Image: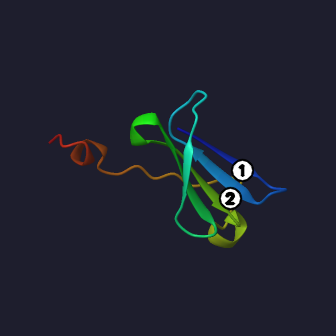
Amino acid sequence: MKISYDKEADALYIRLIEGDHECRVVRLTSDIALDFAQGETLVGIEVLGASRLFPKPEQPTIVLEDLLASAGRP
């Protein structure tokens, strides 16, 4: 996973899968879009107006919790 922030565009992008993918874009809101590759694999999430939503979009805080439980593992 890679998170990048473009200050000029005020856009945060969360790349879940590396590589070049031809994507279908699904807009959840005017500020949030999901990029899906072939097979409906979620490749990335774009957040526009990131500075309104995150206190420091250039230095996002990442919290990973219960990863094994989410994957169906004890």
Give the answer, above or below, for where 21 lies relative to 29: above
Looking at the image, residue 24 sits to the left or right of residue 72; the answer is right
Looking at the image, residue 73 sits to the left or right of residue 47; the answer is left
Residue 5 numbered mark, or none: 1
Looking at the image, residue 58 sits to the left or right of residue 23; the answer is right
Which quarter of the picture shows residue 53? bottom right
**Separation of residues labelled 2 and 1 (CA atoms):** 7 Å
Q: In what element is the residue under mark 2?
A: loop
28 or 68: which is nearer to us? 28
Residue 57 numbered mark, or none: 2
Residue at (61, 28) in percent of width and height: 20
Residue 74 numbered mark, or none: none
Count of numbered tags: 2
Rendered location of residue 46, percent (x, y): 61, 54
Quarter the C terminus occupies:
top left
First in residue order: circle 2 vs circle 1: 1
Colouring used for the render: rainbow
Which quarter of the picture shows residue 23? top right
Extreme residue in the right direction: 8
Give the answer, above or below, for where 72 lies relative to 19: below
Extreme residue in the bottom direction: 52
39 or 64: which is nearer to us? 39
Residue at (51, 34) in percent of width and height: 17
Residue at (71, 50) in percent of width and height: 5
Q: In what element is the residue under mark 1?
A: strand
Rendered location of residue 14, percent (x, y): 58, 47
Rendered location of residue 64, percent (x, y): 40, 49
Rendered location of residue 41, percent (x, y): 42, 40
Three-letter residue code for mark 1: Tyr
34 or 72: which is nearer to us? 34
Looking at the image, residue 25 sits to the left or right of residue 48; the answer is left
